Image (tube, rainbow, N blue to C red):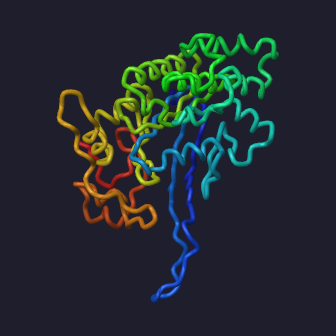
């Protein structure tokens, strides 16, 4: 997989939101407050790879995907798709990008127009990219529905007539309709019962192998990441703090935050897991040094003054920690 060409490359990507315009106080003028949703993100995703983005809420996972999809402009750095800057794609390359990269949203029902039948919802990208004649559309939609385990008569049903799991399957069929090379999914199985989650995970895993898709999957569930994705990137307050092969990272984490996530994950036949200790710093007023230092049991004095870069260790994994968990 390491020899495959990069699909996405993120080069020191930053995304800063301005909270206000500043103001005056007794101490003088206060500068505008800013929130750094992404801070120096470096990540490479290769063709055919499957990458999980994990982390607590507010870590920047969804913002990162919006930058990758070209829905949000970065404040600094570059986001590349097959070597081209996503923000400056030509019209022809943007049309190709829109066909090649498909999104499965967390709220699948809200992402589908409730006034359209599944035939038109799935058929929309087919029509947009002129992938078949109108007379062939119903057969093509039926084939896509069959691929995601839905009967052909689903084409004549509205989203409101479908269960949560069925709506997710229609959303997946719609994502596949443009014959994409990349699937980007944001918590695509959250909120479903365990049985339905397992069915959809098996479906996504099978589709990825059958079609040679590149998969990027946001999840807060480490078990989902382990089952579905070969590589993992752990995010905390806008930064990637650890990345590497999923099984290696979860078996032997190098960053204390990754270990804390594992310790907080529920396990069968064991007591309810403890939540991560300490308070998450405000992203508007980040402390100096490592932003996890205030919650880290291994924090030393240098952790509170020096911000660790994402660096490669002797194990060929990447971690942003001054004192990684290396035996």
**Residue 303 in the image, given as x and y percentages of width and height:** 31, 61
**Residue ID at (35%, 57%):** 280
Counting the numbered discs, the total is: 0
Q: Is residue 16 left or right of residue 100?
A: left
Q: Nearer the viewer, residue 189 or 117?
A: 117
Q: Is residue 276 left or right of residue 64?
A: left
Q: Nearer the viewer, residue 296 or 10?
A: 296
- Using the rendered view, name the quadrant where residue 325 is placed: top left
Q: Is residue 203 left or right of residue 178?
A: left
- Using the rendered view, name the quadrant where residue 315 is placed: top left
**Residue 117 in the image, given as x and y percentages of width and height:** 67, 23
**Residue ID at (71%, 10%):** 139
**Residue 86 in the image, given as x and y percentages of width and height:** 68, 44
Q: Please tell me whether residue 240 is drawn above or below residue 268 in the rendered image.
A: below
Q: Please tell me whether residue 178 is drawn above or below residue 279 in the rendered image.
A: above
Q: Quadrant of the C terminus?
A: top left
Is residue 13 in view?
yes
**Residue 181 in the image, given as x and y percentages of width and height:** 63, 26
Q: Please tell me whether residue 110 is drawn above or below residue 275 in the rendered image.
A: above
**Residue ID at (39%, 61%):** 307
Is residue 213 in view?
no
Q: Nearer the viewer, residue 153 or 223?
A: 153
């Amino acid at each position: 997989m390491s020899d495959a060409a990069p699909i996405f490359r993120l080069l020191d990507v930053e995304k800063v939101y301005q909270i206000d315009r500043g103001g005056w106080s007794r101490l003088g003028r206060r500068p505008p407050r800013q929130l750094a949703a992404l801070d120096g993100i470096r990540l490479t995703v290769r063709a055919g790879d499957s990458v999980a983005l994990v982390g607590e809420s507010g870590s920047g996972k969804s913002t990162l995907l919006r930058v990758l999809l070209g829905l949000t402009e970065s404040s600094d750095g570059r986001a590349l798709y097959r070597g081209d800057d996503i923000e400056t794609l030509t019209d022809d390359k943007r049309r190709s990008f829109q066909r090649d990269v498909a999104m499965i949203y967390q709220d699948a029902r809200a992402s589908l127009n409730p006034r359209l039948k599944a035939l038109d919802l799935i058929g929309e990208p087919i029509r947009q990219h002129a992938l078949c004649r109108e007379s062939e559309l119903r057969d093509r939609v039926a084939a896509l529905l069959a691929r995601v385990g839905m009967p052909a008569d689903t084409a004549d049903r509205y989203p409101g007539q479908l269960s949560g799991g069925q709506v997710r399957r229609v959303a997946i069929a719609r994502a596949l309709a443009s014959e994409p090379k990349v699937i980007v999914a944001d918590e695509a199985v959250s909120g479903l019962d365990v049985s339905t989650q397992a069915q959809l995970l098996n479906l996504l895993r099978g589709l990825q192998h059958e079609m040679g898709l590149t998969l990027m999957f946001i999840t807060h569930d480490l078990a989902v990441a382990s089952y579905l994705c070969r590589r993992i990137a752990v995010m905390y307050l806008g930064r990637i703090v650890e990345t590497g092969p999923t099984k290696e990272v979860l078996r032997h984490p190098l960053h204390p935050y990754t270990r804390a996530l594992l310790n907080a994950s529920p396990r069968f036949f064991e007591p309810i897991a403890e939540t991560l200790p300490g308070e998450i710093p405000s992203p508007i007023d980040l402390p100096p040094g490592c932003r996890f230092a205030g919650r880290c049991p291994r924090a030393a004095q240098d952790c509170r003054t020096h911000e660790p870069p994402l660096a490669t260790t002797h194990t060929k994994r990447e971690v942003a920690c001054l004192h990684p968990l290396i035996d």
